[in-house]
Image (spheres, rainbow, N blue to C red):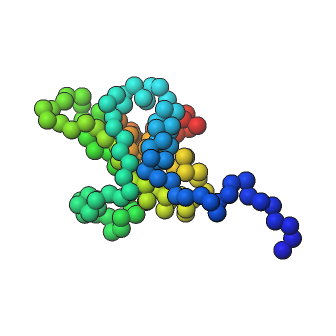
Amino acid sequence: MGSINPPSVDWAMRKAPSLTDFETLAEAAFLRLPKRFLRYCNGLIIQIEDFPDEELLDEMGCESEFELLGLFRGHGLAQGDEVQTGQFPNMVYLYRRPILDAWAESEETLGDLIRHVLIHEIGHHFGLSDEDMETIEREAD
């Protein structure tokens, strides 16, 4: 088998990133977004959960709890900026376990995948096209 070089990271001692770890990664990704993008995100709340709930999965037509990586809930800028009485704040949900599952299947770093999902979900807030979101991702690198 030849000589084995020790890995640069001791994966044998690593644990899966916690909800708090995900919050830290999401916050770091959010702060790296282009300033022109961030100025419209005032008041946006990013919520990290392990999975979407059953009601949401049914509503979205998902067959598995691993299908949904993130979700934007709220009144997007594409619908106008008129705030309604009793309106909940705009929120982006990132789902830790489905993101970890997608990460295991990809060549991306976990931070890059979280940034991708975050940008995609915030993009719904803006009513952006996939091309617009790809441009923002490139600018956030």
Q: Residue most toward the right?
A: 2
State which quadrant residue 87 falls in. Answer: top left
State which quadrant residue 140 falls in. Answer: top right
- Which residue corresponds to the image point at 49% horizontal and 58% vertical from the top-left? 100
- Which residue corresponds to the image point at 47% horizontal and 25% vertical from the top-left? 35
Q: Is residue 108 left or right of residue 25?
A: right
Q: Residue most toward the bottom?
A: 1
- Which residue corresponds to the image point at 31% horizontal and 30% vertical from the top-left? 43
Q: Closest to the observer: 121 or 131?
A: 121
Residue 9 in sight: yes
Q: Is residue 10 above or below residue 32?
A: below
Q: Is residue 128 above or below residue 43?
A: below
Q: Is residue 42 above or below residue 101?
A: above
Q: Closest to the observer: 134 or 115?
A: 115
- Which residue corresponds to the image point at 64% horizontal and 63% vertical from the top-left? 12
Q: Position of residue 22 (x, y in %)?
A: 46, 47
Q: Closest to the observer: 15 or 23?
A: 15
State which quadrant residue 139 falls in. Answer: top right
Q: Is residue 78 left or right of residue 112?
A: left
Q: Quadrant of the C terminus?
A: top right
Q: Closest to the observer: 31 or 119?
A: 31
Q: Quadrant of the N terminus?
A: bottom right
Q: Position of residue 55 (x, y in %)?
A: 23, 60
Q: Position of residue 10 (x, y in %)?
A: 68, 57
Q: Position of residue 108 (x, y in %)?
A: 58, 53
